Amino acid sequence: MTYPLRKSDSGFAADILDGLMGVPKTLPAKYFYDARGSLLFEEICDLPEYYPTRVETALLKRHAREIAARAGEGVTLVEFGAGALKKVELLLAALPVPAAYMPIDISGEFLESQAAALRARRPGLVVRPVVADFAVADLPPLRAGERRIGFFPGSTIGNFDPDEACAFLRRARNTLSAMLVGVDLVKAPHIVHAAYNDAAGITAAFNKNVLLRINRELGADFDPASFDHYAFYDPRLRRIEMHLVSKTDQRVEVLSRGIDFMEGEPIHTESSYKYTVGDFQDLALAAGYLPAAAFVDGDRQFSLHWLEP
Ligand code: AVJ
């Protein structure tokens, strides 16, 4: 069962071709999340090197009461890029009345199964999953008296360039009463680097999964073994860049077009921006919000921002 906003993914083929025929080659990060990609991301969240999930979870637990008090009673919760629906339970535990919960995620099969599991765990909760790209999904207008809280954890906002992040926040603002955003903080490069270069190779498998998806859905013939996972932190741009780098000169068929790679040529698959608390508050201000509260862990690794429109 799905809710009103299902968007078709007919844009997949066009987006992939666009990205692979561009100079330099790119692929949109949202396409990591097919069923397998969503599972691999869940594995990433449990990796010893991947600190964001653990630190944000601890922050949500520690500040759940204050967040719930700010949220208020009888609210609707809308989560952007909801994944496994785990973090929201930390909020639901503290919210006065179990409110309706609308998780939005692009990974349809995964979202439906996670929603079923959440309903089983919390029989009283109204769960309305929306299979959509949250960056373009239009939320229904706020009804009179409705209080709707946006929840955007995981530093997924870091996948946008700062101007896109600002535009997303500005657009969401009309349909929300407040917004809780998780933002990864600027820190020592080696810590960030390790989080995207785990010893077990799960992040590499996650990165290469997009090639397998293109093979399956577009009849392409990528050999993932002929690409290297390459992720590095750029301290000037304050972002991780993930790439898939061709190990050889090769031609790949995608939708009966030949895509040529030179040895060492990258496909840029993801950027993950890090912010200082002040810089993110400035971004929120530029998007028209009042950054009313910021919660930060003792090691200053991660932040949660309470924004009011
Ligand atoms: C889901 C976007 C928050 O950028 O850290 C994890 C995705 N990529 N490891 C991130 C990701 C590589 C993750 N977000």
Image (cartoon, helix red, strand yellow):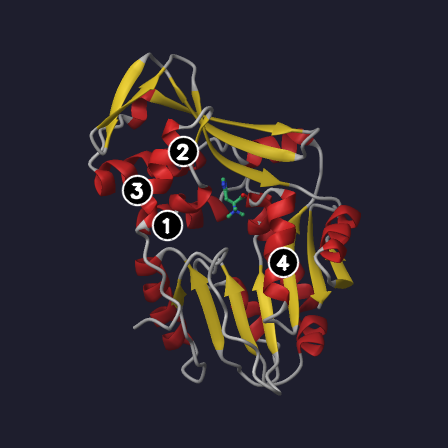
Q: Quadrant of residue 17?
A: top left
Mark 1 or 3: in front is 3
Q: Position of residue 48 (x, y in %)?
A: 53, 41
Q: Position of residue 53 (x, y in %)?
A: 56, 51
Residue underneath mark 2: 19
Is label 3 within 8 A of ligand 1 (CB to nearest ligand atom)?
Answer: no
For the residue pair 80 and 38, the one nearer the viewer reads as 80
Q: Are marks 4 and 2 in contact (CB under 8 Å)?
A: no
The answer to whether 275 appears left or right of 222 in the picture is right
Q: Which amino acid type corresponds to the residue marked 1 in the rendered image?
A: Leu
Secondary element at tag 3: helix
For the residue pair 173 and 249, the one nearer the viewer reads as 173
At 63% across and 85% down in the image, what residue appears? 73
Q: Which amino acid type corresponds to the residue marked 4 in the rendered image?
A: Leu
At 41% across and 74% down in the image, what residue appears? 128
Compared to 96, does 111 lie above or below? above
Q: Residues within 10 Å of mark 2 (few under 14, many from 20)?
A: some
Q: Earlier in the sequence, mark 3 or mark 4?
A: 3
